[in-house]
Amino acid sequence: MIEVQDLRKRYAGVEAVKGISFRVKQGEIVGFLGPNGAGKSTTMRILTGYLPATSGEVRIAGHDLINESLQIRRKTGYMPENVPLYPDMRVKEFLEYRAALKGLDRRKIRTRVPLVMEKCGVDSVSRKMIANLSRGFRQRVGLADALVHDPALLILDEPTAGLDPNQIRSVRDLIKSLGREHTILLSTHILPEVEMICDRAVIINRGRIEASDTLENLSKMVHSASLHLEIKADRETALRKIKELAPVSEVRVESESDGWLVLECSAKPGEDARAAADQLIKTEKWPLREFHRGKATLEDVFVELTQQ
């Protein structure tokens, strides 16, 4: 669905996107991740035709971005981080107006607008002024706007920004359901959200792609996953000695019973604490009941790949 090859973007001598290449297959939900200033929003604006690239090739649904930008816009729904809405319009009125701008005829508008309002959960506020809606409903209206012309591809930039936990869960479930019918490229800083929704993740840092793979394969790239220990030792002595190990950044006591300590040890980025911990346990002759490396989270992957 999306093919990006050696994409570059320069602003007044500063190269924001430095020759990135990645692909998104049809039917996938892909997380597009990176720290602030990494080039995420710039890349997404280029993909949607809002911003010209300095060089490189972009193809969406088989169309070339430079020569067939109108065809690409017809197949793409874009929801920016700050959703541009008209506060003095009613929800249904706004969506009908946007559908007309996107080229839908009157008959199609009469069927499509009620459909997307129901799908996005805004049919109950269809006659309300947008100015009177909560932040959560405004996000849903923005999503309905991106969907109104039935695009094959949805590009969503921070769709849950500023929402409360209940609203985040609601919008997240909605995006997941949309993934059954649309290809979705999703940018967000909420990494557990990506783990719940996405099939793959593309991580960009300082204008370059650091990784692009399934979440399971990304977790195997990390050397700083936590270490789980269950030992019989004096609490204060064990915490002090383990914390002194060079690869260890933090030690937490998960539980304590009959002298047995269950510890979770976090390693520094790029470090593996297993060898050092094993040597310490043998030196101190602590009875050992459990020793295993925890599974790396997407946050572990993100920190290790993007930290300087």
Image (cartoon, rainbow, N blue to C red):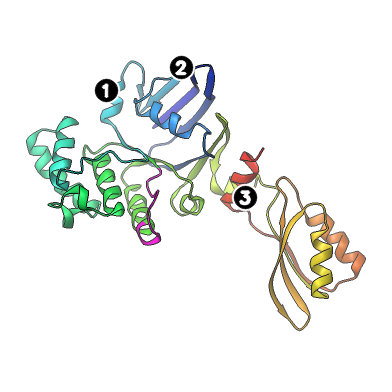
Residue 72 horizontal side relative to residue 16, left or right: left
Q: What residue is at 50 percent from the left and 54 percent from the top?
A: 192
Please report the residue visible at 78 percent of the width from the left and 54 percent of the height from the top. Answer: 273
Furthest residue toward bottom: 258
Among numbered discs 1 and 2, the one appearing first in the sequence? 2
Whole-number angstrom distance, CA of label 1 to CA of label 3: 40 Å
Q: Relative to residue 95, is residue 292 drawn left or right?
A: right
Residue topped by disc 1: 70
**Residue sitting at 76 percent across and 51 percent down?**
272
Q: Residue furthest left?
A: 107
Q: Which mark is residue 251?
A: none
Residue 93 spot, x, y in % from top left: 12, 43
Helix, strand or loop for disc 3:
helix
Tell me the distance, in whole angstroms, between the alpha carbons under discs 1 and 2. Answer: 19 Å
- The circle on residue 300 is 3
What's the residue type where badge 3 is placed?
Asp
Q: Quadrant of the N terminus?
A: top left
Find residue 189 and report its horizontal and vertical position in percent: 48, 46
Q: Residues within 10 Å of mark 2 (few under 14, many from 20)?
A: some
Pick the residue in front: 88 or 170. 88
Magenta-tinted stretch: 158-167
Question: Which residue bears the numbered disc 2?
Answer: 54
Identify whether 139 is placed above or below 68.
Answer: below
Residue type at numbered disc 1: Leu
Residue 270 figure quarter:
top right
Query: Helix, strand or loop at disc 2?
Result: loop
